[in-house]
Image: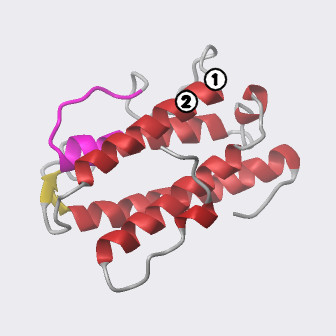
Amino acid sequence: MPPLSPSSAALDGYKRQLPMLESWLDFHRATLELKCAGLDDEQVRRPSAEPSALTLLGLVQHLAEVERNWFQRVVAGLDVPPVFGEATGYRLDPARTLEDVLGVWRREIARGREIVAGRPLDGTGRVMEGPVPGMEVSLRWVFVHMIEEYARHNGHADILRERIDGVTGA
């Protein structure tokens, strides 16, 4: 997968829903990667502010898990283990580097793209766990949820990055 950047994730327009949804999701994925660009392993492990232990590295891990959950478990109905051995992805392993985590995250994105390819937006999957187990959702719903999930966490990432070195913006 080529490196993501917000400029390469330009919107496709309004005529076709799937390219529009994919473009918005790609924009938010690219924004997360941009928030980590140029930082070292120590910086991406720096927590936001007590009592929160939220870090940029934890956000990337969490979003790798989110990618796996919604595209592999829900859309494809696969029984796959958590990406990093626990359900949220936030727990940091001292041996895990930013490059390692970004590689895993990119693979989860690529796998999600494979799963989505050729599926109709009205195709459904079933939520297996969480607050609404058994709920049936469309691929369209999953895309909207993923965009919302990334948008929320990119707000966190923006604050984390600004706290680390003063850099702001998408």
Q: Residue 156 — which label?
A: none
Residue 4 is situated, as x and y percent measured from the top left of the image, at: 57, 52
Circle 1 is placed at which residue position?
97
Q: Quadrant of the C terminus?
A: bottom right
Image mark count = 2
Amino acid found under the numbered disc labelled 1: Thr
In this orientation, which residue lies closer to the viewer: 145 or 109?
A: 109
Residue 11 is situated, as x and y percent measured from the top left of the image, at: 49, 75
Quadrant of res 116: bottom left
SS for callout 1: loop
Quadrant of res 65: top left
Label 2, residues with CA under 10 Å away: few <14, some 14-19, many ≥20: some
User: Does the residue at mark 1 contact the one at mark 2 (Cβ under 8 Å)?
Assistant: yes
Label 1, residues with CA under 10 Å away: few <14, some 14-19, many ≥20: some
Residue 77 is situated, as x and y percent measured from the top left of the image, at: 14, 42
Furthest residue to the front? 2
Gap between marks 1 and 2 measured at Cα: 6 Å
Circle 2 is placed at which residue position?
101
Colour scheme used in the picture? secondary structure
In this orientation, which residue lies closer to the viewer: 72 or 17?
A: 17
Residue 155 is situated, as x and y percent measured from the top left of the image, at: 63, 60
Q: Along the horizontal axis of the image, is 95 left or right of 68?
A: right
Q: Looking at the picture, does residue 10 appear above or below residue 85? A: below
Residue at (73, 39) in percent of width and height:
50
Residue at (62, 47) in percent of width and height:
33
In this orientation, which residue lies closer to the viewer: 168 or 163?
A: 168
Amino acid found under the numbered disc labelled 2: Val
Furthest residue to the bottom? 15
Q: Along the horizontal axis of the image, is 28 left or right of 117?
A: right
Stretch of the chain drawn in magenta: 68-83
- For the question of whether residue 55 can be seen, the reply is no
Residue 71 in magenta?
Answer: yes
